[in-house]
Image (tube, rainbow, N blue to C red):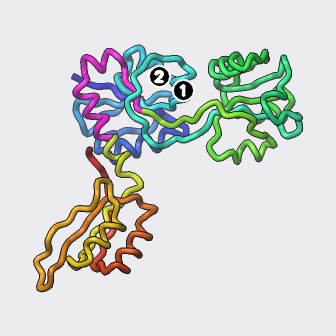
Amino acid sequence: MVVRFAIPNKGRLQEPAIRLLEDAGIGAVDREERQLFARTRDPELELVFVRAQDIPSLVEKGAADLGITGYDLVLESGAKVVKLLDLGFGFARMVVAASEKSGIRAVKDIRPGARVTTEFPNLAGRYFARKKLRVELSRVSGAAEIAPIVGVADLIVDLTSTGTTLRTHGLRVIDTLFETSAWLVANRQSMREKRAKLEEVKTALESVVRARGKKLVMMNVPESKLAAIKRVMPGMAGPTVSRVEAAKPMLAVQAVVEAELVEEIVRKAKRAGARDILVVPIERVLP
C-alpha cells in the first residue's frame, strides 16, 4: 500500500509544508528541483508536488490520498474532502478591499455594477450574492491589488496577512469574508481504505504542530517551596514533580509551557526559590 501525499510546488505554503514534513520525520528523500514525485523516509508514503490550488480537486478525485493546501482554496474549489488538521501556518484573511480614492468605506457604499477583480470568483460571487449586490466579476491569476490602480476594478477580493501590501497600493479593507490557514485534507474513500496509515501521518504532523511555540522548563526546587513553584508553572497538564537524591529535601519540577511565558515563569520561579533552571526546545508533542 502506498499513500500519495500532495504538497504545494511553490508559493507561500510550500516552504512551511516541506519544513513540517521534515520536522515530522517524513521528509522527501533525494528530491531534485522541479521533480514532481519524491520518495520519503516512509516507504509507504510518496510525495507529489503540484499547485496548491489544484490540490483540493486532486484529493477529491483520489489522485492523491492526502494534501496540504489552504482552507481558502478548499472553499473556492468546492471540493468534497475530509479536513483532518489545521497545520498552524499560512494564516491570512479573505477580504474585500477598495481604493482609498473610490469613496467606498463600507459594503453599503458599493453601487450596483461595481467592478470586482479576484483570484477567487466562486467565493467572491457567493459573498456578493449573500449581500444581494449585483457586481461585475473578473478573474485574475495574481496581483489583484493592481486592478484598482490601473482603473479596471473598483474593488478586489483577495487574501491578506498583514494588510501591508494593500495599504502600499492605496487599498482599504471594507469587509472580511473569513480567516484561512493551511490544512491537511484527505480523500473520503482513502479515509475508509487506508485510514490507519492516514491517521499515522496526521498524528506525526500534529505532534510537530502541538510542539511549536512550546518549551520544556525544568528546575530543582526545595521541597518547602513546591507549593509556590506550582503556582507559577502551569504546564499543559500541570507540572511533573519527582524527588532528587540530595542532602537536603529537593524536588525536580518540569512542565511544558508556552514559549512567550518562559521569561516570566523563570523570573517568578527564581524568586520563589527554584535553581538549576533549564529551558529546552521541544520537537514533538504526542497526545
- Look at the image and give the residue range highlighted in magenta: 184-205
Q: Residue at x 43, y 30 (%)?
A: 49
**Relative to 137, 154 lies left or right:** right
- Above-or-below relation of 178 to 26: above
Q: Residue at x 25, y 39 (%)?
A: 41
The residue singled out by tag 1 in the image is 73
Residue 130 falls left or right of residue 111: left
Q: Where on the picture, by quarter, is residue 203? A: top left
Task: Tell me, yes or no, if residue 6 can be seen here.
Answer: no
Res 121 → quadrant: top right
Q: Quadrant of residue 195?
A: top left
Q: What amino acid type should be assigned to the residue bearing mark 2?
A: Pro
User: What residue would you read off at disc 2?
Assistant: 56
Q: Are the residues tagged 1 and 2 within 8 Å (C-beta)?
A: yes
Separation of residues labelled 1 and 2 (CA atoms):
7 Å
Which amino acid is tagged 1? Leu
Can residue 55 be seen here? The reply is yes
Image quarter (top left, top right, bottom left or bottom right) of the C terminus: top left
Q: Is residue 185 magenta?
A: yes
> For the stretch drawn in magenta, what is the main secondary structure?
helix
* Of pointers 1 and 2, the one earlier in the residue sequence: 2
Question: Which residue sits at x=63%, y=22%?
Answer: 123
